[in-house]
Image: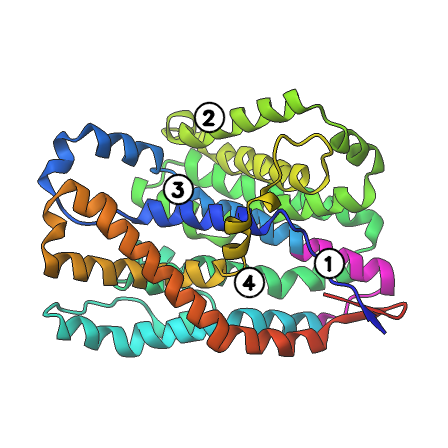
């Protein structure tokens, strides 16, 4: 029996870029008076003010990859082995996730006390144990005291998606699958529109818009719809494969401008409900263009450095706040947090270095052993096994 792994070589690099944008969004945390008068800082902050949209890209990418694998399995086997799918997701997600939860709730408060600070953790442990931590944030209208726990909200939403999505695709005839995407996208849009149009308190709307599963599910559904098109819309894919380079450049430039000016474009009224649709369409285009277009002006797989670190992005995302906190502590002890250069360069480089080290150790000492077990639950078709 031969093994055939479904692998998209140009997506690992994009994973790293998505993480790096989130990392920079969370960086520059020290309180330095020079910030207020520094044009460099103001410019840098403006550029990375929407770095959190890297999480949106992760959601779209997850929707694409998971849906692609499930549709492929259903096409080959005429069914989806939901149990094996769950086991694969558990082996990939749970070990590091629960390690972060245990560290955050059991050990971090003592570390904070040791450093002379007071732990004011407000997060509800059992909600994070059940992967509904994002609803804990929504209900309290604030993030956990330990940012390393708070960042897990997106993992919770992905696990909720992984729980229901294979069941939905398994029972839906393939010819009706496209309508499932439409219903999810319209339903999610309606949820955002309702909360924006009825003028909820600004803080409440922010948390509902950012952390509520019904608001975010647009991203996964759009990624899933892109996977469906890749399988079942030959006319669309032929056009995408032959899309001219000049048009690709225009789409990317337009997408970058929307990302940079998303607050100016969408914030301030009910039209914020459209933001996720516009951004998810662009991210879905990026995924399809990188995988299938023949006239791309670049392919991310050619960037070996980004592609290499792309396989560590789950650890980088989950652990980067620990790296940032280590860097902030060292910077404070050394006194480098009193200068703009110290905060923007020294702290950032230290934080990224520690984040990369922690994710490398996590992957090689723990995650990869579970990934080897995950391979035993591949689905089998026609003498070949598929991931």
Q: Position of residue 340 (x, y in %)?
A: 16, 41
Viewer-nearest of labels 4 and 1? 1
Query: In the displayed structure, does residue 294 sit left or right of residue 299?
Result: right
Contact (Cβ within 8 Å) of mark 1 with mark 2: no
The region drawn magenta spans 66-82
Contact (Cβ within 8 Å) of mark 3 with mark 4: no
First in sequence: mark 3 vs mark 4:
3
- Location of mark 3 (residue): 51
Front-most of 314 and 220?
314
First in sequence: mark 2 vs mark 3:
3
Contact (Cβ within 8 Å) of mark 4 with mark 1: no
SS for dot 3: loop
First in sequence: mark 4 vs mark 2:
4
Residue drawn at x 73%, y 71% is: 378
- Location of mark 1 (residue): 6
Viewer-nearest of labels 3 and 1? 1
**Quarter location, residue 170:** bottom right
Viewer-nearest of labels 3 and 4? 3
- Location of mark 4 (residue): 160
* Magenta span dominant secondary structure: helix
Query: In the displayed structure, does residue 260 sit left or right of residue 65?
Result: left
Name the quarter where the C terminus is drawn.
bottom right
Viewer-nearest of labels 4 and 2? 2
Front-most of 212 and 364?
364
- Location of mark 2 (residue): 257
Magenta span contains residue 105: no
């Amino acid at each position: 029996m031969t093994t055939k792994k479904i692998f998209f070589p140009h997506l690992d690099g994009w994973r790293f870029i998505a993480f790096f944008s989130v990392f920079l969004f969370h960086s520059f945390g020290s309180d330095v008076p020079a910030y207020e008068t520094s044009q460099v800082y103001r410019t840098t902050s403006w550029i990375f003010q929407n770095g959190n949209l890297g999480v949106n890209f992760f959601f779209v990418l997850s929707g694409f990859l998971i849906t692609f694998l499930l549709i492929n399995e259903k096409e080959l086997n005429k069914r989806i082995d939901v149990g094996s799918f769950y086991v694969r997701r558990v082996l990939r997600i749970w070990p590091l996730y629960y390690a972060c939860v245990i560290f955050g709730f059991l050990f971090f408060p003592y570390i904070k006390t040791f450093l002379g600070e007071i732990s004011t953790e407000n997060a509800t442990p059992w909600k994070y144990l059940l992967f509904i931590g994002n609803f804990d944030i929504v209900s309290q209208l604030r993030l956990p005291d330990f940012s390393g726990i708070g960042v897990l909200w997106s993992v919770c939403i992905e696990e909720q998606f992984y729980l229901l999505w294979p069941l939905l695709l398994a029972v839906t005839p393939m010819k009706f699958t496209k309508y499932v995407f439409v219903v999810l996208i319209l339903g999610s849009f309606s949820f955002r529109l309702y909360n924006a149009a009825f003028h909820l308190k600004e803080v409440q709307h922010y948390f509902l818009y950012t952390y509520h599963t019904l608001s975010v599910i647009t991203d996964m559904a759009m990624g899933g719809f892109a996977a469906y098109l890749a399988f079942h819309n030959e006319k669309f894919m032929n056009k995408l494969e032959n899309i001219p380079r000049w048009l690709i450049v225009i789409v990317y430039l337009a997408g970058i401008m929307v990302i940079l000016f998303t607050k100016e474009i969408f914030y301030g009224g009910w039209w914020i409900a459209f933001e996720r649709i516009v951004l998810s369409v662009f991210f879905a285009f990026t995924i399809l263009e990188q995988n299938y277009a023949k006239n791309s002006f670049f392919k991310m797989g050619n960037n070996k450095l980004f592609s290499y670190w792309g396989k560590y992005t789950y650890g980088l995302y989950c652990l980067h706040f620990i790296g940032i906190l280590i860097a902030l502590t060292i910077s404070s002890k050394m006194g480098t947090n009193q200068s703009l250069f110290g905060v923007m360069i020294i702290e950032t480089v230290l934080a990224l270095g520690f984040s990369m080290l922690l994710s490398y150790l996590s992957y090689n000492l723990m995650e990869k052993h579970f990934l080897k077990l995950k391979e035993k639950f591949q689905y089998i078709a026609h003498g070949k096994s598929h991931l």
